[in-house]
Amino acid sequence: MSDHTVRQGEHLTRIAEKYGFRDFHTIWDDGANSKLKAKRSSPNVLNPGDVLQVPEKSPPTESRPTTKIHIWQVPSNTLDLEIIVKDENDEPRKDTPCSLTIEGDKQDLSTDPDGRIRKDDLPFRSEIGSLVVDNLEIPLRIGHMDPVDELSGKIARLNNLGYDAGDIDEDTDETSEKFRSAVEEFQCDHKIHVDGICGTATQAKLKEVHGC
């Protein structure tokens, strides 16, 4: 068993591959990670500094007769990306032309009737990309979303939803005027008690509206 400290941009599929595991559940479901699993509801939304216990890897064994040819198919590790584009009134931008670029691979797409863009089977190492809608380029950082109970996760979700909560990289805290104002606006829009504090109820609604 070895320790792995999560770095920014890492998710469990990427970490599992680093240690030679095809299925992240081998790590995630290990009893040594039960406390972290209870704390983080999704293995794809880990926080930098989280510590995973990685079990020793043992090669799988299969018993087959030697007089025949046998074929084993190894599943590939891929990611699914889903983005919902909305207007300033929080309404989905349906049938809207856009372009999605992931790791230099550009594809012209249109949103569906729910304003959704979905890209399946991305290589699990995918991390950097961008979405262009109406000549506005939106940077994408796959795997960089921190948990909703962390300040960085709250700021990122609020910013993604159009509330200006500040810059994650700046020295922003939950008492700053910009952050509290963004929280109050979100609470008002979603009929939550308006107090400017991103507590448990607001976090749950923020996660629900954001989608993760």
Image (cartoon, rainbow, N blue to C red):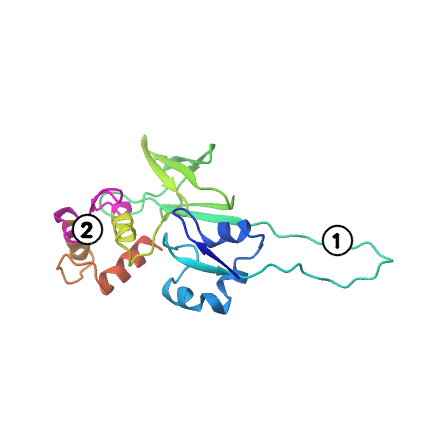
Q: Which residue is mark 1?
A: 71
In the picture provided, is 76 more to the left or to the right than 2?
right
What type is the residue that disc 2 sits on? Asp
As drawn, which residue projects farthest toward the top?
135
Q: Is residue 73 magenta?
A: no
In the picture provided, is 138 more to the left or to the right than 18?
left
Quarter containing the C terminus: bottom left
Percent of width and height locating residue 115:
35, 46
Binning the other alpha carbons within 10 Å of mark 2 as few (below 14), some (14 to 19) or many (20 upward) gives some
Percent of width and height locating residue 125:
50, 43
Q: Is residue 173 magenta?
A: yes
Percent of width and height locating residue 189:
18, 54
Percent of width and height locating residue 51:
42, 58
How far is mark 2 from mark 1, CA to CA?
Answer: 56 Å
User: Dot 1 lies on which element?
Assistant: loop
Splitting the image into 4 quarters, where does residue 36 fall?
A: bottom left
Q: Residue visible at 28% across and 48% down?
A: 156
In the picture provided, is 94 more to the left or to the right than 20?
left
State which tag comes first along the sequence, 2 or 1. Answer: 1
As drawn, which residue projects farthest toward the front?
2
Name the foreground residue: 79 vs 149: 149
For residue 35, the mark is: none
In the picture provided, is 92 more to the left or to the right than 52?
left
Q: Which residue is mark 2?
A: 173
Main secondary structure found in the magenta portion: loop
What type is the residue that disc 1 sits on? Ile
Splitting the image into 4 quarters, where does residue 199 fall?
A: bottom left
Name the foreground residue: 203 vs 136: 203
User: Dot 2 lies on which element?
Assistant: loop
> In this picture, is 113 found above or below 61?
above
Q: Which residues are magenta?
A: 159-180
